Image: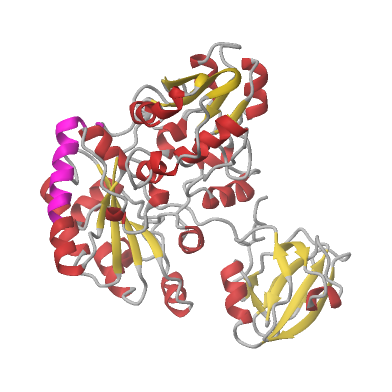
């Protein structure tokens, strides 16, 4: 659903974005006041409400008067001087009810009532710019919304913040936030991110050091997307030297640039090779050992992809310190394998044989295939179970895209023959949050009908994967970091 668009209010008018109500809790103040699903929240205490966070913040002030509309599709304008309500639709009905230190009992269709805040940058490494055509519109949204960062852990650059946004973050204590730093060298950051001057609301917002220091009471989880020859090497050391000097920066994730074969009219960039990945890990390990000795935390966490590219073993489970960056691809493989590094310490009891023979294919990306193949070796001892790990080339994004989470229905249709197995398991990270749909809108049902075999999502751990194979337990799996994308889906079906 698309947020209502303002109808060119005058300087003395305030735009109100009606928030559609999805459900009303039974016995709640809202139900007693006659509120029903389909109604819309207009204001709280006479103030326009832009999102669920502002709504919750207003409720914490004690007495709250909620203004409700039924039904209404256009925004109201409230005159700031006399609070006179103008109805663009004569059939619209409005009423109010009050609560005092009590939850009204409303559930909304969306968490953002005024739409998603868009990105002000044109990064050389932006994945949206590398997307092939023909996908659902929400995948092309260049979002950069601090509210989604607080709610769901999506990374933002802060370059599009206004003075009002900065004040609100501090006033409402929207902490922690997840911030894409990339480099602490301001000149290099501008060269890499190329923010549009017309889209930057506050010139101070593009200064990453200034923003981190101004928001000193807000905790930050940061990420550094590394480009070989750009912000790695000594620049990486400079960035970590700065980030580790700031007490409100809790950690940093280092991830390699993601590329596709669809980089038309974009700056020339390259993927990391083995030697470059090894250099990144060497530098990061120096920092990790130093910081752990001094502070008891390793602070910076390389993504799994760096270890696979470098051909180096993954850190121990303890080294991930509770997996704070799991949703950013940091530690997902270790989490899958378990503490012993093989996943076998948590495997369920395995039968000696199956009642009847079964051929199972585990489809995955090129990067993870070898690791997965070694991990499932104990299952191959089960008589009657034929288990194959199929490394699939990405037919949609190109050969350079090797991660499992970006496999599409097309990849499976191209890499799996019709009726060649009794069961196909796909990585759960290929599925859109809360659905059985892949990134290209192929459903597991459709894929199964095409391949003439059952298709299910695999497990997030080796133990869960084994149970799915042996017991037929279906898992929706963890679509890490997808909650913000789910918001983009609901906000952008009509316009993105």
Point 52% across, 52% down: residue = 484
Point 23% across, 40% down: residue = 227
User: Which residue ends up furthest to the front in the rendered image?
Assistant: 352
Q: Name the spot of residue 242 as percent of width and height, x first.
A: 18, 63
**Magenta span includes 273:** yes
State the residue in front, 415 or 49.
Answer: 415
State the residue in front, 401 or 363.
Answer: 363
Residue 311 appears left or right of 490: left
Colour mapping: secondary structure
Residue 260 in sight from this viewpoint:
no
State the residue in front, 194 or 80.
Answer: 194
Which portion, as a residue range, is magenta?
270-287
User: Which residue ends up furthest to the right in the rendered image?
Assistant: 91
Q: Name the spot of residue 51 as percent of width and height, x first.
A: 60, 66
Q: Name the spot of residue 226 as percent of width and height, x first.
A: 25, 44
State the residue in front, 447 or 138.
Answer: 447
- The vertical placement of 417 against 179, above or below, is above
Residue 476 in sight from this viewpoint:
yes
Q: Name the spot of residue 292 as percent of width and height, x first.
A: 18, 62
Point 52% across, 45% down: residue = 478
Residue 442 appears left or right of 337: right
Q: Main secondary structure of the magenta part?
A: helix
Point 67% across, 86% down: residue = 101
Image quarter where the C terminus lies is top right
Q: Quadrant of residue 91?
A: bottom right
- Count of numbered tags: 0
**Magenta span includes 157:** no
């Amino acid at each position: 659903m698309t947020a209502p668009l303002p109808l060119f209010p005058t300087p003395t008018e305030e735009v109100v974005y009606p928030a559609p109500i999805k459900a009303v809790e039974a016995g709640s103040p809202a139900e007693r006041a006659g509120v029903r699903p389909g109604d819309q929240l207009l204001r709280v205490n006479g103030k326009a409400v832009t999102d669920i966070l502002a709504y919750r913040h207003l409720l914490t002030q004690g007495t709250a008067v909620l203004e409700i509309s039924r039904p209404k599709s256009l925004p109201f304008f409230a005159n700031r001087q006399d609070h006179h309500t103008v109805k663009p639709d004569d059939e619209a009905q409005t009423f109010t009810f009050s609560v005092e230190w009590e939850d009204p009992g409303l559930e909304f269709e969306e968490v953002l009532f005024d739409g998603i805040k868009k990105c002000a940058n044109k990064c050389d490494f932006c994945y949206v710019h590398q997307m092939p055509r023909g996908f659902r519109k929400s995948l092309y949204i260049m979002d950069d919304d601090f509210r989604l960062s607080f709610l769901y852990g999506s990374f933002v650059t802060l370059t599009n913040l206004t003075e009002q946004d900065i004040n609100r973050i501090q006033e409402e204590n929207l902490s922690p936030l997840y911030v894409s730093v990339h480099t602490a060298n301001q000149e290099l950051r501008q060269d890499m991110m190329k923010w549009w001057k017309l889209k930057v609301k506050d010139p101070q917002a593009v200064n990453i050091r200034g923003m981190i220091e101004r928001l000193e009471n807000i905790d930050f989880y940061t990420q550094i997307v590394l480009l070989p020859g750009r912000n790695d090497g000594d620049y990486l050391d400079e960035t970590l030297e700065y980030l580790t000097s700031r007490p409100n920066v809790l950690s940093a994730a280092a991830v390699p640039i993601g590329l596709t074969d669809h980089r038309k009219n974009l700056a020339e960039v390259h993927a990391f090779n083995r030697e470059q990945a090894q250099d990144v890990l060497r530098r990061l390990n120096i920092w990790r050992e130093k910081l752990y000795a001094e502070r008891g935390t390793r602070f910076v966490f390389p993504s799994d992809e760096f270890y696979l590219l470098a051909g180096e073993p993954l850190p121990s489970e303890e080294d991930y310190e509770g997996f704070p960056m799991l949703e950013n691809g940091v530690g997902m493989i270790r989490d899958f394998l378990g503490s012993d590094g093989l996943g076998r310490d948590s495997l369920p009891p395995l039968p000696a044989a199956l009642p009847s023979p079964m051929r199972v294919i585990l489809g995955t990306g090129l990067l993870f295939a070898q690791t997965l193949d070694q991990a499932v070796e104990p299952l191959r001892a089960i008589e009657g179970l034929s288990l194959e790990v199929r490394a699939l080339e990405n037919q949609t994004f190109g050969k350079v895209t090797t991660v499992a989470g970006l496999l599409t229905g097309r990849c499976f249709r191209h890499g799996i023959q019709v009726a060649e197995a009794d069961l196909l398991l796909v990585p759960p990270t290929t599925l859109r949050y809360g659905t059985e749909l892949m990134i290209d809108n192929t459903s597991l049902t459709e894929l199964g009908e095409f391949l003439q075999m059952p298709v299910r999502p695999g497990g997030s751990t080796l133990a869960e994967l084994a149970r799915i194979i042996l017991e037929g337990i279906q898992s929706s799996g963890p679509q890490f970091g997808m909650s913000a994308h789910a918001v983009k889906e609901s906000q952008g079906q009509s316009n993105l």
